[in-house]
């Protein structure tokens, strides 16, 4: 098998985005400043490797604040954002909290709030039960924002209120699928107000464009990321739609499908925005043990975005 030659097209940019790097840094700096344990509400980012690493350093992950026994310890809110009631709840418990919400998610929160205050009824394009969607919908009073998940829901959406209509989107959606939903909403509601600047974040867009760029040249495509990572799952979909029908997610429980690789000449690899590069390196090392591997990194754009951590941690 070792004689079998495999070409890897390594998609770039891939892996950690600025929001994820900031969120992880916030937990690490909080552990230095406050000592352990530091509590984190929800997975800080959707990646098991990252979460397990932070657990080893002294972070304790909970789903709700009421689970925290020692309320004198600080709590961090995850990169996906939280409903408005959560900081209020922390204040009621007299807890120290640090908000690690990605600044690009916070931008959508402010946008939704400003539109609501200006008299608009909101539509959020996103995936039900995703923490980011729960957080964004939780910025506004119940009944003032509706969720639309796909083209079918956009076609059948009924709006009878005597109000202006506007939409915002989850930041980690498929760029192409979202465009199709938006086009339906614009056709059905010509006066609908759209965000001044697209809500889908730079990292999601760049990673999807990079995958799209190479997928058609691949027999097999692997995305390294967690099953609950929205942007990782979208990358698999993008690869399939862009010409590589055999695309799959490689997560912590995945077995490497060597039999499929054995029958392939060119393999594409990318990783979700919450997947550390070490996972990509480990995956490639596993392939090198069984195949003769050549690697061509195909970069479509350089990323230099950096988000600062809150001042209270410096």
Image: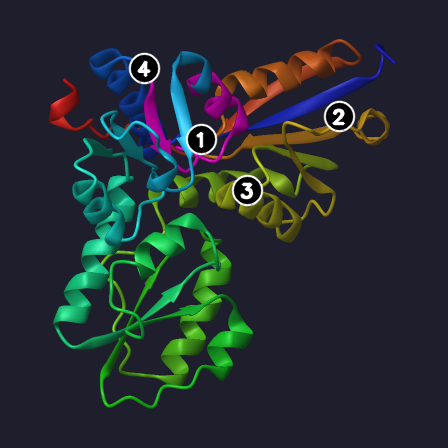
Which tag, 3 or 1, sits closer to the chain's start? 1
Considering the numbered disc 2 on the image, is that residue within a helix, a strand or a loop? loop
Q: Can the viewer see residue 133?
A: yes
Q: Which residue is mark 4?
A: 36
Q: Position of residue 74 (x, y in %)?
A: 24, 27
Q: Which residue is mark 1?
A: 13
Q: Quadrant of residue 91?
A: top left
Quadrant showing the C terminus: top left
Considering the numbered disc 3 on the image, is that residue within a helix, a strand or a loop? loop
Between the C-alphas of marks 2 and 1, the distance is 23 Å
Between the C-alphas of marks 3 and 4, the distance is 27 Å
Q: Could you tell me which residue is drawn at 38 percent across and 50 percent down?
A: 132
Which tag, 2 or 1, sits closer to the chain's start? 1
State left or right for residue 123 relative to residue 250. Answer: left
Please name whichever residue, 94 or 171, is drawn nearer the observer in this view of the structure: 94
Q: Which residue is mark 3?
A: 228
Q: Which residue is mark 2?
A: 256
* Foreground disc of the pair 2, 1: 2
Q: Could you tell me which residue is drawn at 76 percent across and 9 percent down?
A: 289
* Foreground disc of the pair 3, 4: 4
């Amino acid at each position: 098998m070792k004689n079998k030659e495999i070409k890897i097209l390594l998609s770039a940019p891939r892996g950690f985005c600025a929001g994820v790097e900031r969120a992880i840094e916030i937990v690490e700096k909080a552990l230095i400043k406050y000592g352990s344990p530091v509590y984190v509400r929800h997975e800080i980012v959707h990646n098991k490797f990252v979460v397990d690493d932070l657990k080893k350093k002294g972070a304790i992950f909970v789903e709700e604040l009421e689970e925290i026994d020692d309320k004198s310890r600080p709590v961090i809110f995850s990169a996906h954002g939280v409903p408005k009631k959560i900081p209020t709840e922390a204040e009621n418990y007299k807890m120290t909290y640090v908000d690690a919400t990605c600044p690009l998610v916070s931008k959508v929160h402010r946008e939704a709030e400003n539109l609501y205050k200006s008299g608009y009824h909101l539509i959020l394009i996103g995936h039900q039960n995703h923490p980011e969607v729960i957080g964004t919908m939780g910025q506004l009073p119940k009944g003032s924002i509706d969720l639309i998940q796909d083209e079918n829901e956009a076609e059948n959406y009924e709006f009878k209120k005597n109000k202006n209509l506007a939409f915002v989107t989850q930041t980690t959606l498929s760029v192409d699928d979202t465009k199709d939903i938006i086009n339906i909403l614009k056709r059905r509601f010509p006066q609908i107000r759209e965000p001044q600047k697209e809500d889908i974040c730079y990292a999601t867009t760049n990673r999807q464009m990079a995958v799209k760029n190479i997928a058609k040249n691949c027999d097999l495509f692997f995305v390294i990321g967690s099953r609950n990572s929205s942007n990782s799952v979208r990358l698999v979909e993008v690869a399939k739609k862009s010409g590589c029908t055999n695309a799959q997610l490689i997560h912590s429980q995945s077995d490497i499908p060597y039999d499929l690789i054995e029958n392939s000449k060119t393999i594409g690899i990318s990783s979700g925005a919450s997947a550390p590069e070490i996972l990509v390196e480990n995956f490639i090392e596993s392939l090198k043990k069984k195949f003769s591997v050549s690697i061509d990194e195909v970069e479509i754009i350089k990323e230099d975005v950096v988000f600062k951590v809150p001042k209270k941690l410096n």
